[in-house]
Image: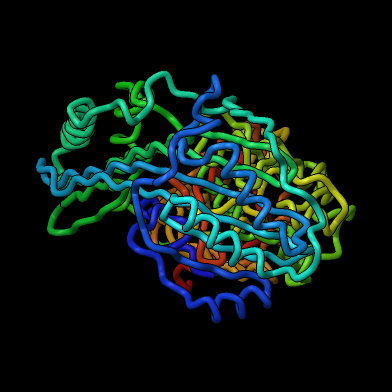
């Protein structure tokens, strides 16, 4: 599975434009096989009058969806015998700025909104969505989704709702909707000035800024309404440096569910300095020798390996369908005892944090591998029901246009007992992998290839020289078993990682302490 479009600082999970229209006959055919989609006419203004939810103390970002309309929609969704149903509304405002060579080359604001309606019957889902928030359009979509079932109603729709707005992990004092361009532009210009002032070899600086203000509302057949406001921001800096006729480029970026105050002078200095240093070191970098070598995965960004080569294999839908190598390994040892792997929604202001998932389940911390033993998969509500366990809060969707799937949030390995110096000194000849770009992973088997943008050669237990243009090749489950040392410097990487699966992109975080893998194939120069 290609890495570049799935995990890139430039990847944008917000796809704009009109959705594809599907005929009703084709839609019902799709529903029969598991999932159906319907696009109805677009409209940015719903026709219903404000009602019950808007009058509640906690307020609602969707005054069009009052108690009465939500109850009718859920009644329609369950009228043909569906055993579960939900209504998912989303409204997002997204701002983008790009500065190149001191000039703002592009600026945009996009607004996207709509409602997805889902009817569940066992492992199957009927799904429809509409950008038109009028009651007629919503009820038409609900009837289409309900066509998955064909029997008497199994459960009546709620007449009243228990409303909640969990706000634990990323509340902002100043929402992005209240921040003007005049407050953002000086920060962008400051980063450019810092990067250009660090070294005379810096010939070009490009900066991309984004901020999102997104609200979601989820109403379920069991009578719950959950409201969540989800901020996001990202600052991406790309630097080109020139020396003696040679040019190299590299980048750094920071992202999170943060607000304007997060962009302190220290953070601006950090992202600019990282971009410049990662670029300048390439002038002295070489390719390492090829072959099987110990590989030290540096703390932070190396979590991409954990996410791709192992994390996807622990998503419950792959295991339920027996396409993952981990399908029959629950309760078994899959790694050394020093390895504990967690997927968490509760990391404050992290890009992958969630107060509540897209099925209404509370964000939580889920231990996947505990002291080397596989103890849990990553579940949405459907897979949790299949396995007879509680959902882990991992039911996620890109937007109202998509069905939820089991997806990672903040995936990381916990600290080990060693120091970074101990790990490096234990390697007589090997490499350190620091930053990654593209690669490929086969989720079923866990085979991977990753491209290392920055790293170091280790000789005699010490850093010898910087390296570049390196592939590391291996198998995720095997690499996990070959972890022999882990440091006490674990951290989530602060970059703007975006994960793709089944055509859907969602924001994630990942992290790792410094880890020694005893043997991986390094694609360097033959010696």
Q: Quadrant of residue 91?
A: top left
Q: Position of residue 370 (x, y in %)?
A: 81, 42
How many marks can you see? Answer: 0
Spot occupied by residue 488 in the image (x, y as percentages of width and height): 65, 31
Q: Seen in the image, is 323 located left or right of residue 38? A: right
Say which of 263 and 125 sits in front. Answer: 125
Instruction: Identify the residue at image location x=38%, y=26%.
Output: 175
Image coloring type: rainbow
Q: Could you say which is closer to the camera, residue 17 or residue 487?
A: 17
Whether residue 398 is visible to the viewer of this picture, yes or no, is: no
Q: Is residue 499 visible?
A: yes
Q: Identify whether 335 is placed above or below 38.
A: above
* Image position of 290 (left or right of 385): left
139 lies left or right of 119: left
Q: Residue at x 17, y 27 (%)?
A: 182
Q: Residue at the spot x=86%, y=64% of the render?
A: 328
Q: Position of residue 521 (x, y in %)?
A: 59, 67
Q: In the depicted view, which residue is nearer to us: 243 or 451?
A: 451
Across and down, in percent, residue 71 comes to 64, 44
- Identified at 47% across, 45% down, the residue is 90
Q: Quadrant of the N terminus?
A: bottom right
User: Is 385 or 205 nearer to us in this picture?
Assistant: 385
Q: Is residue 433 above or below residue 412?
A: below
Above or below residue 160? Residue 333 is below
């Amino acid at each position: 599975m290609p890495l570049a479009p799935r995990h890139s600082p430039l990847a944008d999970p917000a796809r704009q434009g009109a959705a594809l229209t599907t005929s009703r006959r084709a839609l019902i055919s799709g529903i029969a096989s598991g999932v159906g989609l319907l696009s109805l006419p677009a409209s940015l203004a719903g026709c219903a009058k404000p009602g019950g939810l808007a009058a509640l103390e906690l307020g609602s970002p969707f005054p069009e969806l009052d108690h009465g309309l939500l109850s009718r929609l859920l009644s329609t969704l369950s009228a043909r015998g569906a055993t579960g149903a939900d209504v998912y509304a989303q409204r997002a405002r997204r701002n983008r700025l790009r500065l190149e060579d001191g000039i703002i080359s592009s600026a945009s604001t996009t607004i996207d909104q709509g409602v997805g309606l889902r009817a569940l019957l066992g492992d199957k889902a009927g799904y429809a969505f509409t950008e038109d928030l009028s009651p007629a359009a919503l009820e038409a979509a609900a009837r289409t989704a309900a066509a998955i079932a064909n029997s008497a109603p199994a459960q009546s729709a709620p007449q009243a709702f228990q409303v909640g707005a969990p706000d634990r992990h990323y509340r902002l004092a100043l929402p992005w909707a209240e921040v003007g361009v005049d407050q953002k532009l000086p920060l962008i210009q400051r980063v450019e000035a810092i990067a250009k002032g660090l070294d005379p070899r810096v010939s070009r600086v490009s900066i991309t800024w984004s901020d999102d203000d997104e609200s979601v509302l989820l109403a379920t057949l069991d009578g719950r309404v959950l409201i969540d406001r989800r901020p996001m921001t990202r600052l991406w800096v790309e630097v080109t440096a020139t020396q003696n006729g040679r040019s190299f480029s590299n980048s750094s970026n920071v992202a999170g569910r943060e607000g304007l105050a997060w962009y302190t002078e220290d953070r601006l200095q950090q992202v600019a300095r990282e971009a410049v240093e990662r670029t300048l070191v390439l002038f002295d970098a070489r390719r390492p020798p090829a072959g099987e070598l110990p590989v030290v995965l540096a703390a932070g960004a190396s979590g991409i390996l954990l996410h791709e080569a192992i994390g996807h294999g622990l998503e419950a839908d792959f295991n339920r369908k027996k396409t993952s190598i981990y399908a029959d390994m629950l309760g078994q040892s899959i790694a050394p005892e020093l390895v504990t792997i967690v997927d968490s929604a509760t990391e404050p202001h992290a890009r992958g944090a969630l107060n509540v998932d897209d099925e209404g389940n509370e964000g939580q911390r889920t231990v996947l591998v505990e002291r080397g033993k596989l103890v849990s998969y990553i579940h949405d509500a459907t897979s949790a029901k299949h396995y007879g366990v509680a959902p882990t809060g991992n039911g996620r969707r890109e937007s109202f246009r998509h069905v939820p799937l089991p997806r990672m949030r903040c995936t990381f390995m916990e600290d080990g007992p060693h120091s970074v110096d101990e790990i490096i000194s234990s390697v007589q000849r090997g490499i350190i992998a620091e930053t990654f770009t593209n690669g490929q992973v086969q989720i079923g088997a866990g085979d991977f290839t990753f491209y290392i943008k920055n790293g170091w050669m280790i000789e005699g237990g010490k850093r010898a020289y910087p390296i570049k243009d390196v592939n590391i090749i291996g198998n995720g489950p095997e690499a996990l078993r070959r972890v022999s040392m882990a440091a006490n410097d674990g951290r989530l990487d602060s970059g703007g990682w975006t994960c793709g699966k089944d055509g859907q992109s969602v924001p994630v975080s990942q992290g790792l302490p410094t880890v020694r893998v005893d043997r991986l194939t390094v694609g360097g120069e033959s010696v």
